[in-house]
Amino acid sequence: MPIETNLCKPTLACLRVVFGVVIFSCAWTSQAQQPAKKEYLFRGKVTQVDAASKQLTVTNEPIEGWMGVMTMAFRVSNEEVLKHIKPGDQLTAKVYAGDFTLYDVKVVPQAPAIAATPAQPPGLNLETLEQMALANNPSIAQAQANLRAATGLAKQAGLYPNPTVGYYGDEIRGGFSGGGKQGGFVSQTIVIGGKLGAARRLAQLQANHVETSEQAQRLRVLNNVRSLFYQVLAAQRLVEVRQNLAKLAGDTIQTSRQLANVGQADRPDILQAEVERQQAIVTLRVAEQELRANWRVLAAVIGKPELPLTRLEGDLDALPELNYDEWVATTLRESPEIKLAQQAVERSEASLVQARKAPIPDLQITGILVQNYEPLETTRQPTGLQGGAQIGVQLPIFNRNQGGVAAAKADVESTKQNLVRVQFQLQRELAGMFRDYTSARLLVQQYKAEMLPRAEQAYRLYQANYQRMAGAYPQVLISQRTLFQLEADYVQALANAWQSALVIRGFGLMDGLADPISPSAGVGQAGSSGMGAYNSRPVTAQ
């Protein structure tokens, strides 16, 4: 009697025929016409032994003309086999079309032990990459050199002016007597009014500024390494998911061809499966290129661009949990940009102090000792040794550094307003960062708690239905493909959430190859208004 059915021919995008039922039906129909079912060689790996239900769960190799790779439960013809087989064993057996019973089950002997191959080197972790970056990133060494330069300039700014010594001569060949004066002098600038202390203070504040810049550069490098680490980690995992999708697309082609062999699929179904396979391969290649590109950027930031692509070890799923109010307070308290703005206020106030001290005149003291060869009127002998001294000051009548003081006052006001501006700017940026972080984290939680479990459950149910011959194998493939695609989307959401979290925790400092602050910024003004403003040239005696 013919079997009545309402099923129509399926397409791969919307398969409507239960593959297991089709195979069973075809086998049952052929059994009425042929004396024996078609026999296949079965190979697979045991994953579970269920003595109670007298079944083995096996992951089989593809069976040409019947089924692709599957993990499902099979009955055994000889129950004694269950006493001697265990999970992990490789087996062979005979199966017949439409019959999910394993006949003549044999365990494949384990291959003899061979010399252990060298273990693969462990992957790189985040801490190792951070240490490599601190040791090799050129901006770190540059920032440290800048700090040494600023420290040297601060030391130089506090040194006292050197004295001046020289030759003094007057009327060397003058007069009828051939007399004259010859000798030497010593001249010294006496700095008063605390100008040296003010210059030293300003230079030290500039050194502190460069030191904070060096700390900011270290943080910037570490943040950049962490960001790229999780980008590579996500790209690495995404490649694995894309590989699974590409393999699944290949299985779909095989299934479509098997359905065509039994008249349950058409040429368009096979073509559609082949197109999906090509799409999966292209997507895999793009993911591999993304992995290589991210690795090259990471290698450049750590200062080893020649470092070969290496597997990274880390927990991509362990997202940090951040609180907006806590991080606003932390940023306003610890951000290097806030510290740099505060130090700029201190420097401008120190510059104002220096500008007010600049008009205070320094003492110019000169001592002279000469041999006077002019003869005395009484004895006609040379006059002999004579000494002299000069003390002078520059009167601040016209130039009292009025313009310098006014500019310094304006600079103090500007830096104070800049500090407020930086505080507001960071709060504004934090609002946007937390918006992105919260959205990405919610998406991750939705994937992890809702979508992925449901997709996995759907896949397991379709698989169980197929094992009971109550569902179509193409539906198993479709549900598995949906699960893999959701996993790919989940990985991308994780990567986005990590980037947002790292930007927040890194105070927005992310460029590991940015140019650090130079110690010359502001030091030239300190030097010109400090030691460089002193005139140490000798005052010639009259």
Image (spheres, rainbow, N blue to C red):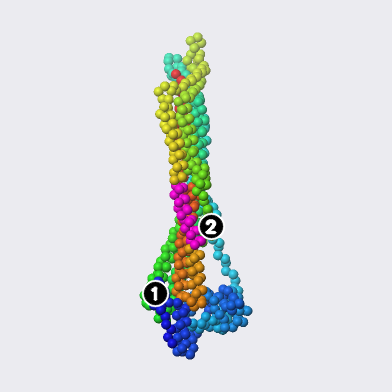
Residue type at mark 1 is Thr
One can see residue 112 in this view: no
Q: Nearer the viewer, residue 485 or 139?
A: 485
Q: Nearer the viewer, residue 301 or 178?
A: 301
One can see residue 36 in this view: yes
Q: Nearer the viewer, mark 1 or mark 2?
A: 1
- Describe the element under mark 2 as helix, strand or loop: loop
Mark 1 touching mark 2, by CB under 8 A?
no
Image quarter where the C terminus lies is top left
Instruction: Name the residue at the right extreme.
Output: 83
Q: Residue at x 42, y 22 (%)?
A: 397
Image x and y of residue 264, in percent: 41, 79
Q: Nearer the viewer, residue 211 or 52?
A: 52
- Describe the element under mark 1 as helix, strand or loop: loop
- Asked whether residue 431 is drawn in magenta, I would say yes
Instruction: From this view, report whether residue 61 is shown above or below residue 494.
Output: below
Instruction: From this view, report whether residue 268 is shown above or below residue 363.
Output: below
Q: Where is mark 2, residue-wise?
A: 318
The quadrant holding residue 416 is top left
Image x and y of residue 49, in percent: 59, 75
The residues colored magenta run 429-450
Residue type at mark 2 is Ala
Most common SS among magenta residues: helix
Q: Which mark is residue 11?
A: 1
Q: How many marks?
A: 2
Q: Alpha-carbon neighbours of circle 2 within 10 Å: few (<14), some, or many (≥20)?
A: few
